[in-house]
Image: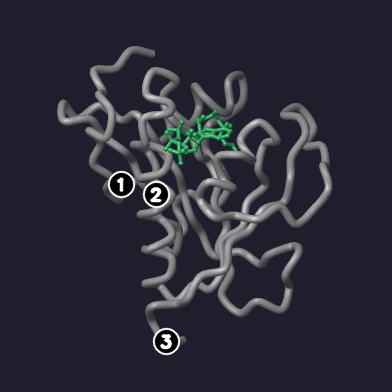
Amino acid sequence: MTTDATPASVTVEEVPAADTIPLRGAVLRPGRPAAIDGDDDPATFHLAARTAAGQVVGVVRFHPAPCPWRPEVQAPWQLRGMATDPAVRGTGAGRALVVEGLTRVAVRGGDLVWCDARVAAAGFYERMGFTVVTGEYDKPGIGPHLGMLKHLVPLTPR
Ligand SMILES: CC(C)(COP(=O)(O)OP(=O)(O)OC[C@H]1O[C@@H](n2cnc3c(N)ncnc32)[C@H](O)[C@@H]1OP(=O)(O)O)[C@@H](O)C(=O)NCCC(=O)NCCS
């Protein structure tokens, strides 16, 4: 992948699932279908980080889903499909996506976001305020993961 991105030059916006599929597939799911169950559910939302030229250099999706490790939480959401273009990593695109996503989840009344974090990405999620709440577990064909979550203050009453 090539990009014309420069640090902090991205704009994050909500997009249809289809706009996120190419980068998600290339980064996270080579050799596997890039679509994920629930991509087109009405409650699911997808974010893309674009350069000034319109190139998608980062993607993520959020959808309501029970948290495996905090079943008592009332309005949990799952983060999935987090990927940035290798050419822009470390320049803030991932942060911009997560920050925007957490705000949008809180606006929708969510009180927790959780994810199956690839071990190699756990440090990124920790920088975003997530906490590791499990030991390592394997996802067949992908590798070791850690359960991570972040509590939110809902911005819309339930
Ligand atoms: C993980 C990933 C999304 C991070 O995206 P990014 O665009 O590099 O993130 P940012 O540049 O916004 O980084 C934000 C902060 O996290 C840090 N960071 C980024 N990736 C990190 C990592 N793998 N481990 C530790 N810290 C990391 C950055 O240094 C930065 O730190 P700062 O707060 O001091 O500025 C990206 O590396 C990626 O797509 N990886 C491959 C796919 C993947 O593993 N996705 C997650 C699946 S669970």
**What label does residue 157 carry, if any?**
3
Q: Answer whether labels 2 and 1 touch (C-beta < 8 Å).
A: yes
59 to 131, vertically: above or below = above
Q: Answer whether labels 2 and 3 touch (C-beta < 8 Å).
A: no
Instruction: Give the CA distance from mark 1 to mark 3.
Output: 25 Å
Crowd tier of the residue under label 3, counting other residues whose Cα lies within 10 Å: few below 14, some 14–19, many 20 or above? few
Front label number (2 vs 3) = 3
Query: Which element carries disc 3, helix, strand or loop?
Result: loop
Q: Amino acid at mark 3?
A: Pro
Instruction: Return the residue at label 2.
Output: 46
**How many numbered dots are placed on residues in this image?**
3
- 19 displayed left or right of 28: left
Residue drawn at point x = 33 percent, y = 12 percent = 2
Instruction: Return the residue at label 1.
Output: 15
Q: Amino acid at mark 1?
A: Val
Query: Residue 56's spot in the image, x, y percent?
Result: 30, 30
Residue drawn at point x = 38 percent, y = 63 percent = 103
- 66 displayed left or right of 84: right
105 to 117, vertically: above or below = below
State which tag comes first along the sequence, 2 or 1: 1
Query: Which element carries disc 2, helix, strand or loop?
Result: strand
Q: How is the image coloured?
A: one colour
- 64 displayed left or right of 58: right
Query: Residue 36's spot in the image, x, y percent?
Result: 56, 42
